Structure formats: C-alpha cells, structure tokens
Image (tube, rainbow, N blue to C red):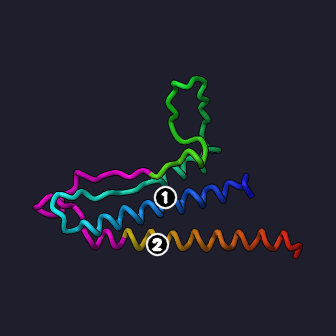
Amino acid sequence: MVQDVTWKVMEKDLEGLAKRFKANSRNLANANTPGYQRRNVSFEDQLRDVVDSSKKLKMTITHHGHIPTRPHSVSDVTPVERQIKDEIYRLDGNNVDPEREMAVLMEARMMYGAMSRFAARKLANYRTVIAGR
C-alpha cells in the first residue's frame, strides 16, 4: 500500500485542498480589512504534470545545481500559496469578493468530499482482498 501512487496522489490532493480551505477562510475573515490582498492556493497543475509524466520526455538531473523543470514525483509536489495583487475589487485596496470566495470554498469542499469517498472505497477494496472474499 505504501508504493501505491494513487494513495500518494490522494494524500497530496487532500493536503492541497486543506491549504486552500485555510487560505479561503483567511480571505473571508479579512473581507472588510482595508488593503488586504486575497490569497490563492494552486497545486493541481503540478500534480497533473507528475501523473502525466509518462507521456513526456524525462529530463535527467545529473548535477545538484541543475534546476528541475517540474516535480519528478508526487512527494515533490507542494501546494503554492500566492498573494493576488493585480486585482481590484474595492477602493480601499481590498480585493476579496465574498461571493467568489464562497464559490471557491464550496468547490474545494466538494472536491475534498469526493476524494475522501474515493479513499474510503479504495480502502474497502483492500479490506475485501485481505479478507479473501
């Protein structure tokens, strides 16, 4: 089970979604704070690159000074939180749109629930195999 890539992808997905929950919660909590710049968490592109890496040319890093072009394994994927500065929503410098943040929060909640159900189903399959049914 430790070598199963699916578990690692699910773990990274849940980790990224948890960071997104925190960032969106902070955004909503600071919706009325003048000058607050909203934050966005992205990780899906990195995860997709790793999963689809079998379709791409693999580049070998032969020296510790070489810069990798993308993550090479699921464990290299890190959710990135960025401050969004180039959007203007209000005159006081705050760029948090509560309706947008609630939509992003609901989307993350649905994705987290779906991934949790998928993990539970996969675990149930392992239990079935171990039980020998």
Q: Is residue 99 magenta?
A: yes
Q: Is residue 49 left or right of residue 82?
A: right
Q: Is residue 131 magenta?
A: no
Q: Residue at x 67, y 54 (%)?
A: 5
- Where's residue 72, x and y in %? 59, 41
* Amino acid at circle 1: Gly
**Residue named by callout 1:** 16
* Amino acid at circle 2: Arg
Q: Residue furthest right?
A: 132
Question: Which sits earlier in the primary sequence, circle 1 or circle 2?
Answer: 1
Nearer to the camera, 17 or 58: 17
Q: Residues within 10 Å of mark 2 (few under 14, many from 20)?
A: some
Q: Residue at x 74, y 74 (%)?
A: 124
For the N terminus, the image quarter is bottom right
Residue range in magenta is: 80-103
**Residue named by callout 2:** 109
What separation in Å lies between label 1 and label 2 (alpha carbons)? 12 Å
Q: Is residue 73 left or right of residue 70?
A: right
Against 48, residue 57 (above or below) is: above
For the C terminus, the image quarter is bottom right
